[in-house]
Image (tube, rainbow, N blue to C red):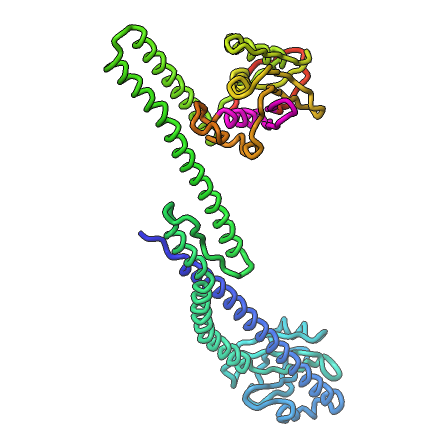
Amino acid sequence: MRRVPLRVRVAAAFAVAMAVVLAATGWFVYARLGSHLSAAIDGELRVRADDLSALVHDRGVGALGAVEDPRFVESGEAYAQLLDGHGKVLDATRFLRGRPVLTSAQLRRAVHAPIFADLGPVPGLDEPSRVLATPAGRGALVLVVGVTRGDRSDTLASLRTELLIAGPIALLLATVAGYALAGLALRPVEAMRRRAAAVSADTPGERLPVPKTGDELERLALTLNLMLTRLEAALERERDFVADAGHELRTPLALLRTELELALRHSERVDELREAVRAASEEADRIAQLAEDLLLIARTDKGELALRLETLDVRELLDSVAVRFDWRVTEVGRNLEVDAAPGTFLRGDRLRLEQALGNLVDNALRYGAGRVRVEAIAAGDGRVELHVHDDGPGFPPDFLPRAFERFTRPGADRAGRGTGLGLSIVRTIAAAHGGTAAAANTEVGADVWITLPSIVGAEAPASRTMR
């Protein structure tokens, strides 16, 4: 079963709310009018009772013919009656036939103070009435003045009929208006929906229409457009990443296939075969390293880079990296120096940090010249900088701003053996530790470093794995 459209639900909710409002308003008007009519009847009875009481007081019982005076009693709708303290009718409107309209209990109360009472039909009148009984004249006399409630009932019935007719009509009109207003309010949403249905990876730059309403709809459209911009940028990065990765993998794979084909077809001597296998092994190592680097970057992009944190002595960390490169330093005839003050500690993943520093040392040996110096410098703000210097030509000035971007290499090395991922890996590992990476040229070469939070600790806590 399909869900009810939002426009219909909004109109239905509006109709229910209007029904409640109209019902409450009708009830309030009906109750207030009934109260006003009752107050008007009581006021009229008081005026009539005051007039008749004054006559009785001035003229005595003999003047009671005034109860038939139209100035005091409206024929067919009002009546009056004079009773003594025992309930005997001394004078009354003619159609009452001398029967008292008050009960004994009401009479006893009326002798002492005025009372109002609602009575059923009295003799000569077939309608309920309301009376005011009040002490009158000299002695225990009670004057009763009454009036039918037919006019009040007729007025309320007329109002009730009008409300029952006008209320549903007003509710219907309000529902139709609510349905139309909901449609107008949701029109920008429908426009955004249609445009969103047309947005795809093949339509870059497509954005949702932004209604100039200055309300939540406009903010929603702006937020969704910003989201589309971020998604488009992420998609573009992924496309570039895949394209660059394919390009980087194509070269070593082609070389590996060439070396293997040469070994199969043309290697007649053992030394030629051995050289071909060695070259193929180098290309396989390069492919494996590239795959590992790509996997590391992919995990970082997904927030899944696991770190096994422990307290590390910075001097020991740098010495460990230096030991790994002893054979290469000896092979190329260069010097590798380590300089770090003892007692400097940080929290980090030893393998990842050795990988980052190893990339920096490898770049210094590959592209730099002269001695390579690895040192730790206290930054003075609770952080430590791990630098790798060399005495080579340094970075091309136009390359420095993008040195840590993926697959970025200096122009002269675009066709070289590097992958352009080494510095990107360094920045990735530094960021995973809450640090940063930077590079600069010095007077005698290049300087690349990572900045990490340092700690002061005498005892290494137990290591733990973070994601």
Q: Farthest residue to the left: give it.
A: 265
Left/right placement of residue 310 relative to residue 12 reads right
Residue 467 location, x and y as percent?
Answer: 50, 25
Q: Which residues are magenta?
A: 422-450
Residue in view at x 57 percent, y 91 percent: 75
Instruction: Give the vertical position of 220 relative to 448 (above or below).
Output: below
Residue 349 is at least partly visible in this image: no
Q: Quadrant of residue 117?
A: bottom right
Q: Nearer the viewer, residue 334 or 244?
A: 334
Residue 194 location, x and y as percent?
Answer: 38, 56
Q: Nearer the viewer, residue 452 or 250?
A: 250
Left/right placement of residue 382 relative to residue 269 reads right
Residue 38 location, x and y as percent?
Answer: 60, 76
155 drawn magenta = no
423 drawn magenta = yes
Residue 237 location, x and y as percent?
Answer: 45, 37
Left/right placement of residue 77 relative to residue 113 reads left
Q: Farthest residue to the top: give it.
A: 270
Instruction: Give the vertical position of 162 relative to 76 (above or below).
Output: above
Q: Quadrant of residue 353?
A: top right
Residue in view at x 45 percent, y 27 percent: 299
Q: Quadrant of residue 122?
A: bottom right
Instruction: Give the vertical position of 408 relative to 6 (above or below).
Output: above
Instruction: Give the vertical position of 290 relative to 460 (above or below).
Output: below
Q: Nearer the viewer, residue 420 or 155?
A: 420
